[in-house]
Image (spheres, rainbow, N blue to C red):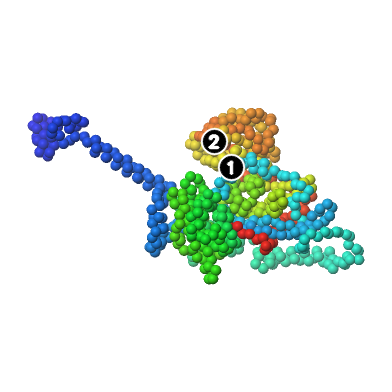
C-alpha cells in the first residue's frame, strides 16, 4: 500500500468514527478526561455472573428433566390445598398422565383344615390339623418390606437348601384321612372276615376288553368332546393371530407356535409412579394394611399424625378402600408412598366416599391434600405396573413373603431351592405368582414348609416336601428329583453382573469377531470365587489370555473354568479335591481383560456350552421304593391346595 492509499484509508476511518487511539489498558481512565474506552471491572463481573447463572439454571433444568422429577418446590401442591382445582386443571392433569398397564393382584393367606392320621405312642389317632396356605401374585414393586433382605449369595443358598433330619413327630408327609372327624379319634385295624368279602362282579377278561375298546375309540374318534387327540398347539390359533394374514386373506392353523404379546420399549427409564388399590377385608387398625403395602413404621407415624385431625379413629371399617400412589425415593432404588387416599363405604347407600388424603411434600413430610381424580373402584385389588422397573425374582419373592408374614428362614429356603433352576437376578413379569403351604405354628413358634409352587411366565415349578425312612427331609419336583443341580451357574459372591454372554461377539480388545466360550460376570476386584460343584482341580496356573486360571473336572464329563483371577486361593493346585461352594480364587483382571470380572465357562465332553442355559443333571432323585408314598403325598398336598378355607380363620392380606 503506497502513502496515498494509506492516507485515504485513514481519512475514511476517521470519517466513520474510528480513530487511531492508544491501546486499551487498565490505566486508560487516568487523567481528568476519560477516553471512553476504559475497561470496567463492574461490567466484566456482571457479565461473568450472568453467564454462570445461566449455566446453573440450564443445568438444573436438564438434571430435573433427566431424573424424572416434576418440580423443585411444593408451590403448586400448596396452592391446590388452598384453592379448589378447576375442571380444566384436572382434565389436563389426567391427560398428561402416562398410561400404565393395570393388573389384578391376588393376595390370600388362608387356614385350611384336614383330618390327618398319625401314630402316637403306638396308637393310630385321627385329629384335625390346620395348615397355612398362601396364594399371591408376586410383588411388582420393591418397597421398604425388602430393604434389609440378605444379599444374593449363591453359597448361602447352597447351605440353606441342604436336606434336614426330621424329628419323629414331624408332619413332613401328612397322612390325610378320607373322612372329617371332630376332636381326636383312635382307630384300630383288624383282618376282614372271609364271610364279608364280596364276590367279584367283573372278571379280569371283561375289564381288559373294556379298557382296550375305550383306548381304541379314543384315537379313532379324536378324543372326547372339545378335545383333539395328539394336538400339539391350540386349534384356534391361526395365521391371522400372528399378523401374517391381513383382512380379506385366507387364514390357516399355525401349529407348534406360541402366541405372545409384542414386547414394547418402556417410555421412561426412571422408577416412575404406580398406584395400587387395596381393599380392607375386615375392620381393624389402618397400620397393618399400610405396612404390607409400602409403608414402614416411620412413614406410618408421619401419615397417622397428619390424619389424626380428620379421622376420628385409627381403625378403618371392613370394605374401606385405600389408594396408594407409590413413587421413587430420592436416595434409594425403592418405591415409597407419595400419596394415601382413604375411602369409607356409606353405611346406608354402600357408596364409596372419600374420607381423607395425605400427600408427601418435597421436604419429606406429609400434609393433607384434596381428593385425587375419581376412579371406578374395581371389585378386585389392582396395581399399576411399571414394566421398565420390575424387581428381580429374588427380591420379589422376599417382598411377597414378608407381605404375608412368612418366616425369613422359610423364605431363604424357598429362594435357595429355585436358585439352581432359575436366574434369580432376572426381572419378573407381570402376573407371576407363588403358592405356599405350611403347617400352622406350634407352641414354640415353629412351622414347616410343605409345598411351594412358583409360576414365572408360562412355566410353573413345584416342589413337595417328603421324608424318607432314614428321617431325611428334602424337596422334590413331581418327577421325584430335587431342585438342586450339581453345578451352580454364577459361582461368585453376590452372583456378579452379567457383562457378556456366551456366543460370537466382537472382542473388546482385538476388535475382531470371535467365539466367547463362557460368560463374563463383573464384580469388584477381590470378590471370592467358588467352585461350581464338587470335583478335582485340573489346572491352577497362568494361561495365555485367561490370566490366572483354574479348571475343575466334575463327574459325567463336565468341566468348569474360571479365568482372569487376581489371585488363586491357597491350597488350590492340580489333584486337590474341592467341594461345591469352596473358595478357589478371587476376581481380578489378569490376562486379556478390560476390567475386573470372572470369565466362567462349562465344557461337556470337551465342548463349550452356555453356562446360563445348558441343562444340568439333578443332584439327587428319590429311589424307586418311595414312588408310591411320594405320589400319595403329592395327591394329598394338591387336595389341601384345592380345599375351601376354614370360615372362622380366613384372612386376606393386602
Occupied quadrant, residue 579: top right
- State which mark lies toward you, 2 or 1: 1
Secondary element type, mark 1: loop
Residue 377 percent across, percent down from the top left? 52, 64
The quarter of the rendered structure image containing the C terminus is: bottom right
- The x, y position of residue 578, in whole percent, is 68, 34
Residue at (69, 45) in percent of width and height: 618
Dot 2 or dot 1: first in sequence order is 1
* Residue occupying the point 16% across, 36% down: 36
> Residue visible at 40% across and 45% down?
63
Q: How far is mark 2 from mark 1, CA to CA?
A: 15 Å
On screen, residue 120 above or below 585: below
> For this view, does 263 lie left or right of residue 420?
left
How crowded pointer 2 is (Cα within 10 Å; few <14, some 14-19, many 20+) is rated as some
Instruction: Kindly identify which residue carries mark 2.
Output: 524
Tell me if label 2 and label 1 are in contact, CB under 8 Å: no
Label 2 residue SS: loop
* Circle on res. 328: none
Question: Considering the image in quadrants, where does the N terminus appear?
Answer: top left
Q: Nearer the viewer, residue 87 or 14?
A: 87
Q: Position of residue 504 (x, y in %)?
A: 54, 41
User: Residue at horizontal 67%, vertical 62%?
Assistant: 648
In the image as oriented, which residue stretches furthest toward the left?
Answer: 4
Query: Visible in this render: residue 431?
Result: no
Residue 495 figure quarter: top right
Q: Which mark is residue 151?
A: 1
Residue 523's x, y, as percent? 55, 37
Amino acid at each position: 500500500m503506497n502513502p496515498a492509499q494509506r492516507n485515504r484509508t485513514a481519512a475514511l476511518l476517521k470519517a466513520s468514527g474510528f480513530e487511531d487511539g492508544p491501546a486499551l489498558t487498565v490505566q486508560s481512565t487516568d487523567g481528568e478526561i476519560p477516553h471512553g474506552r476504559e475497561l470496567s471491572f463492574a461490567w466484566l463481573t456482571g457479565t461473568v455472573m450472568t453467564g454462570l447463572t445461566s449455566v446453573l439454571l440450564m443445568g438444573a433444568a436438564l438434571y430435573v428433566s433427566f431424573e424424572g422429577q416434576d418440580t423443585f418446590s411444593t408451590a403448586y401442591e400448596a396452592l391446590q390445598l388452598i384453592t379448589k382445582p378447576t375442571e380444566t386443571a384436572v382434565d389436563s392433569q389426567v391427560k398428561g398422565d402416562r398410561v400404565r398397564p393395570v393388573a389384578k393382584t391376588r393376595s390370600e393367606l388362608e387356614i385350611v383344615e384336614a383330618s390327618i392320621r398319625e401314630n402316637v405312642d403306638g396308637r393310630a389317632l385321627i385329629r384335625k390339623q390346620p395348615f397355612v396356605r398362601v396364594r399371591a401374585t408376586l410383588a411388582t414393586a420393591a418397597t421398604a418390606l425388602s430393604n434389609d433382605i440378605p444379599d444374593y449369595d449363591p453359597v448361602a443358598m447352597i447351605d440353606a437348601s441342604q436336606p434336614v433330619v426330621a424329628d419323629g413327630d414331624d408332619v413332613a408327609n401328612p397322612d390325610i384321612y378320607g373322612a372329617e372327624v371332630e376332636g381326636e379319634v383312635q382307630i384300630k385295624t383288624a383282618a376282614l372276615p372271609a364271610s364279608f368279602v364280596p364276590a367279584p362282579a367283573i372278571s379280569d377278561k371283561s375289564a381288559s376288553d373294556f379298557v382296550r375298546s375305550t383306548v381304541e375309540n379314543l384315537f379313532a374318534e379324536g378324543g372326547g368332546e372339545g378335545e383333539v387327540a395328539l394336538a400339539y398347539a391350540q386349534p384356534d390359533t391361526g395365521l391371522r393371530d400372528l399378523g401374517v394374514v391381513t383382512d380379506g386373506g385366507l387364514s390357516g392353523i399355525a401349529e407348534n407356535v406360541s402366541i405372545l404379546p409384542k414386547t414394547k420399549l418402556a417410555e421412561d427409564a426412571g422408577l416412575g409412579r404406580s398406584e395400587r388399590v387395596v381393599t380392607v377385608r375386615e375392620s381393624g387398625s389402618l397400620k397393618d394394611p399400610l405396612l404390607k403395602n409400602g409403608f414402614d413404621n416411620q412413614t406410618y407415624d408421619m401419615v397417622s399424625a397428619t390424619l389424626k385431625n380428620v379421622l376420628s379413629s385409627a381403625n378403618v371399617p371392613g370394605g374401606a378402600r385405600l389408594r396408594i400412589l407409590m413413587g421413587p425415593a430420592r436416595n434409594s432404588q425403592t418405591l415409597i408412598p407419595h400419596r394415601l387416599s382413604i375411602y369409607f363405604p356409606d353405611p346406608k347407600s354402600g357408596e364409596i366416599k372419600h374420607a381423607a388424603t395425605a400427600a408427601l411434600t418435597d421436604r419429606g413430610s406429609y400434609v393433607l391434600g384434596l381428593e385425587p381424580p375419581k376412579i371406578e373402584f374395581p371389585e378386585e385389588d389392582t396395581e399399576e405396573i411399571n414394566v421398565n422397573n420390575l424387581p428381580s425374582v429374588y427380591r420379589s419373592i422376599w417382598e411377597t413373603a414378608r407381605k404375608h408374614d412368612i418366616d425369613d428362614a422359610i423364605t431363604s429356603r424357598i429362594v435357595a431351592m429355585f436358585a439352581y433352576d432359575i436366574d434369580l437376578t432376572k426381572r419378573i413379569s407381570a402376573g407371576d405368582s407363588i403358592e405356599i403351604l405350611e403347617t400352622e405354628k406350634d407352641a414354640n413358634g415353629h412351622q414347616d414348609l410343605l409345598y411351594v409352587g412358583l409360576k414365572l411366565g408360562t412355566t410353573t415349578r413345584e416342589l413337595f416336601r417328603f421324608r424318607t425312612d432314614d428321617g431325611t427331609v428334602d424337596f422334590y419336583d413331581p418327577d421325584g428329583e430335587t431342585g438342586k443341580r450339581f453345578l451352580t451357574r454364577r459361582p461368585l459372591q453376590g452372583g456378579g453382573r452379567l457383562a457378556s454372554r456366551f456366543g460370537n461377539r466382537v472382542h473388546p480388545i482385538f476388535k475382531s469377531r470371535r467365539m466367547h466360550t463362557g460368560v463374563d460376570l463383573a464384580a469388584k476386584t477381590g470378590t471370592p470365587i467358588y467352585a461350581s460343584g464338587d470335583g478335582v482341580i485340573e489346572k491352577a496356573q497362568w494361561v495365555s489370555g485367561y490370566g490366572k486360571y483354574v479348571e475343575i473336572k466334575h463327574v459325567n464329563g463336565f468341566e468348569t473354568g474360571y479365568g482372569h483371577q487376581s489371585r488363586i486361593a491357597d491350597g488350590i493346585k492340580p489333584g486337590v479335591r474341592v467341594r461345591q461352594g469352596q473358595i478357589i480364587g478371587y476376581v481380578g483382571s489378569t490376562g486379556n481383560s478390560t476390567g475386573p470380572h470372572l470369565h466362567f465357562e462349562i465344557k461337556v465332553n470337551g465342548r463349550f456350552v452356555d453356562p446360563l442355559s445348558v441343562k444340568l443333571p439333578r443332584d439327587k432323585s428319590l429311589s424307586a421304593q418311595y414312588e408310591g408314598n411320594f405320589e400319595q403325598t403329592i395327591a394329598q398336598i394338591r387336595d389341601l391346595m384345592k380345599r375351601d378355607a376354614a370360615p372362622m380363620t380366613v384372612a386376606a392380606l393386602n
